[in-house]
Every structure is written in structure tokens, then in C-alpha cells.
Amino acid sequence: MPAPASSALRAGELFQVLRDGHARTRAELAEITGLARSTIATRIDALMACGLIGPAGEAVSSGGRPPSRFAFSASSRVVLAVDVGATHVLIALTDLGGRVLDESRAAIAVSVGPAAVLDLVVEQAKHLLERSGRDVRELAGIGIGLPGPVEHSTGRPANPPIMPGWDGFDVPARVQESFGMGGELDVLVDNDVNIMALGERAGFWPVEENLLFVKVATGIGAGIVGRGLLQRGADGTAGDIGHVRLARGDGVLCRCGNVGCLEALASGPAVAAALKAAGVRAESAEDVLDLVRHGSVEAVQAVRQAGRDIGEVLATCVNLLNPSVIVIGGGLSAAGEYLLAGVREVVYQRSLPLATARLRIVQSMAGDRAGVLGASRMIIDHVLSPDRIGALVADA
């Protein structure tokens, strides 16, 4: 007989204690939760039957038979995490702990449209499953990040400026259909900067409750974590700082149709265009980075100015949101301290002293894996929530 719904839900809550990966005995779990040992034993059995936890050796005995320990079985299911960029896709296979098991990279322009991009994603994803010896039935879900605004509740892009043909496209349905699983397969989609914020925090700043992740690449955007939760805003556009207008940008046209946007002044292509206009050979952000590495004074100055421009917008964000950490990621962040110095210069000058007293402004440590780490985390937090685990236990 299935466990009663209330009991199943409580089993889901107990499971959250074990998600940290530490092995514990029934007695230790009873002490942590305040539940009776008999209740703990029943719920442990239910979670083991679902494959979510397993035996993890024995504790030291204080007399008599050593008590058994139990721990989260992170390898019981796998997650596919997808980061779609302007000109590439990165796909990772992870376990339920977020550990990357395998990955695949491919070059493709997001502008070719959703059908071509998603068909490539599915092809590469199936290859990863096959290469790792995992069956599609072991797939807990698929998380996808896209380089544009996304209505998270439906997974549909919303008027993305660099993604022709994607507006309103039902991304989850297309992927579910390709795997032949329909609504049985969880497919969650979000803006790429949001998932990068999740990935950076999960991997490197887990104790920081208030974090701002800023992506500086073809576009500029921010992912906001407040009180430990991703803040998407009413319609999923929170953090779209790339289209904040700067005073020095009068007459500089942005691809959104406005003038003076931060993105039109400080993104990778914008910095390359400014250098080219000044007579320096630079066609792309990669050219800019190469010039910086080779000591080009003009390139260093241009990157430093981009940092100042970004800092001007972030100073307002700091006063408004009071983050403890600002992480700078994206392609142009590879310029390192040349970019960060400009950001810090303006943020610390223009933000309130109390707001910057403990503020750290750092380069991304996840690098180009931030997106897939975050896409994996998005799925993991969804499928391992107390409600979902409770439902799984009730159906077992």
C-alpha cells in the first residue's frame, strides 16, 4: 500500500537532511529531527525503496551491533544541463549532487533557430547518456539556459533580441517530444545569466545568501540571488542591466533600439568596435583579450573603461540590493583584473560605505561551466524538493 500523503511529504522533508551527502545513523537523524526512531526507520525504508538513499557503512559501536549509516545516493539518477550561448552549446551530464560526469561542446549560432539548435542539443545529450552507460529512464530532468529573456513558468523565450524565431517557442515540449517522454520528463528553461548565478553560488559561494552574478559577453546581464533564492521578478526580467542608459552613451545605438545602453558601450563586441574605430585591429572580444594579454595599452584602457561603465550601473545595484558578493563572469571577464579594477573603482566610489563594507567583487571561478552547473542545480532543486520526494515516495 502507498504511504499516506502526509507521511510521504514528511519523508521528503527528512530527505533534505541527507542531501548534504553526510552519512548518518537512524539515531543521529532522530536527534536532528526530533522524530521517533521507529518513524525514522519507516521513512528511511521508503527512501531506500525509491533509490534516493543507500547504506553507507557502519558507525562506531558503543556496545553491541554497530549502527548502520545512510547517505544520499547522488548517482541514482542523472541530469542533463544545457548552456546555449550566442555561438555555442555546452551540454553536461551530472549526478544528483551536481558533479559533472561528462560534457560535450559544439559550435552553433543561436540565430539559426530553435529547431536546429535543440535538435543538436538532443543529439549530443543522447550521445552523452550512451557514452556514460546511462539509460534515458535514469534521467531526472533537463535544465536549459538561453541567452535571452525567458518566461520561466512556461520555458518559452520572450522577445529575445539575438534569437530570431525563438519568441514564444515551446522549448520544453520540443525537448520532451525528442526524448519520447512527453510530460513525464522535467524540462526547465531559464535565462542564461540566472542559471550562471545558481551555478556560481552552488559551486563556490554556498553560504552567501545575497549574490549578484554579472555576465559580460556578447550581452550584459545579471543574475540576482537574495536570501538564498534566485530573484526572477514578476515576469522573469529581473537583472537586465545591459539596457540601463549611461550618460556617456549619447548617440551610441544599441541593438534593442535605444541609445546609450550599457551593453552598447561595455560588452565584448562594443569594446572591440571602439578599438577598431581608434585604429586598433580588433574584430571580436577574443581579439580584445588577445591584445590585453600581449600588453596593448589601448586594449587595457578600453577594458578598464568598460569596467568603469559596468561599475556605474552596479553601484546603483549595490545600493539597492546590498549583495555581499558580486561575481563577474562571461567571456570578457577573462581580462581579469583589468576589467575588475574598473568595476571596483566606480562601485566603491559611488556606493554607500555601509553597502560596500563587506562587499567582494571577484572574477567567476566556475568560468564557462557556470551555466551548466546552474542548469543542473535548477533541475536538482526542483526534483529533490520535499513535495516532489513526498510524491515519489507515495507512488512507490
Image (cartoon, grey):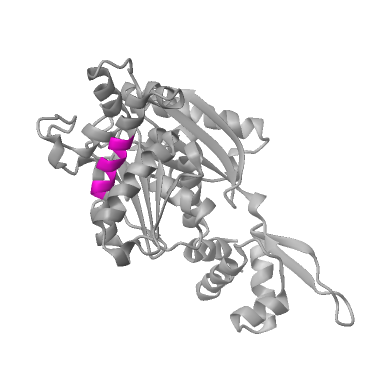
Q: Position of residue 177 (x, y in %)?
A: 43, 35
Q: Main secondary structure of the magenta part?
A: helix
Q: Residue at x 56, y 67 (%)?
A: 16
Q: Quadrant of the C terminus?
A: bottom right
Horizontal relation, residue 59 to residue 379: left or right: right
Q: Does residue 299 appear in this view?
A: yes
Identify whether 297 is placed above or below 235: above
The image shows residue 153 at horizontal and vertical percentages of: 32, 51
Reply yes or no: does residue 73 show up in magenta.
no
From the viewer's perspective, tell me whether residue 303 is left or right of residue 74: left
- Is 359 in front, or is 143? 359
Give the residue displayed 14% in from the left and 29% down from the top.
Answer: 253
Residue ID at (17%, 31%): 254
Determine the image quadrant of residue 68: bottom right
Q: Is residue 151 above or below residue 322?
A: above
Instruction: Kindly tell me whether residue 239 is visible in this rendering.
Output: no
Residue 336 % position (x, y): 44, 38
In the image, the segment drawn in magenta is 304-313
Identity of the residue furthest to the right in this view: 64
Q: Is residue 305 magenta?
A: yes
For the point 28% across and 22% down, the residue is 275
Q: Measured from the top left, where is residue 271 in percent x and y?
A: 29, 28
Quadrant holding the N terminus: bottom right
Query: Residue 131 falls in which quadrant of the image?
Result: top right
